[in-house]
Amino acid sequence: MSVLKKNRRTINVEDVQYVWYICPDEDSPYNILHIFTEDKSIVLAVPLEVENHYIISKGRIFQKKKTSGTWERYQLPMKMENVITPALVASIIRWSVDGNEAESVNWDGKSYPL
């Protein structure tokens, strides 16, 4: 099954194609950067304009490890800029795929709102 690519951007990182886009979250006041592979083995969401920058992994793989497939939150090691560029998206992908020792964060609804 293919994924919707209309009004979304694609990026190739290490010979893998990813789709990414930004849209408002329906349940919060935040915009979300979404990144995923066509097979949805990697599904990432990054809330923007939050005080503590973190990433939500919703896919089956994160940093070369199988995941539960439920929302798992990790502290981002890089600063999120006001302008989301392909270079920033690529660095998030590289860290999410090839990185290690991601620091897990506990969701409290305040420090990590989503």
Image (tube, helix red, strand yellow):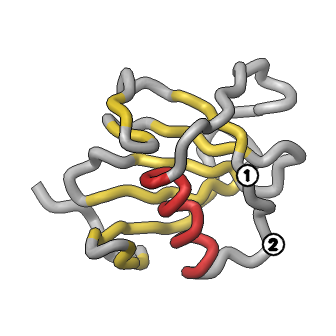
The amino acid type, in three-letter code, at marker 2 is Asn
Which residue occupies 58% across, 68% down? Answer: 91
**Of residues 95 and 33, which is closer to you in this image?**
95
**Of residues 53 and 34, which is closer to you in this image?**
53
Query: Dot 1, how many residues are within 10 Å of its Cα: few (below 14), some (14-19), or many (20+)?
Result: few
| Up/down of 73 relative to 17, above or below | above
Question: Where is residue 110 drawn, in percent x and y?
Answer: 85, 26
Question: Where is residue 30 drawn, in percent x and y?
Answer: 73, 50
Which residue occupies 78% across, 19% down? Answer: 108
Circle count? 2
First-in-chain label (2 vs 1): 1
Asked whether, in this view, residue 93 is left or right of residue 33, the answer is left
The quarter of the displayed image where residue 41 is located: top left
The amino acid type, in three-letter code, at marker 1 is Pro
**Label 2: which secondary element:** loop
| Up/down of 37 relative to 72, above or below | below
Asked whether, in this view, residue 43 is left or right of residue 82, the answer is left
* Residue 10 appearing in the image: no
Question: Where is residue 57 drawn, in percent x and y?
Answer: 49, 39
Which residue occupies 77% across, 48% down? Answer: 53
Check contact, mark 2 vs mark 1: CB within 8 A. no
Query: Dot 2, how many residues are within 10 Å of its Cα: few (below 14), some (14-19), or many (20+)?
Result: few
Q: CA distance from mark 2 to mark 1?
A: 16 Å
Q: Quadrant of the N terminus?
A: bottom left
Location of mark 1 (residue): 77
Which residue occupies 59% across, 80% down? Answer: 87
Location of mark 2 (residue): 82
The quarter of the displayed image where residue 11 is located: bottom left
**Of residues 31 and 95, which is closer to you in this image?**
95
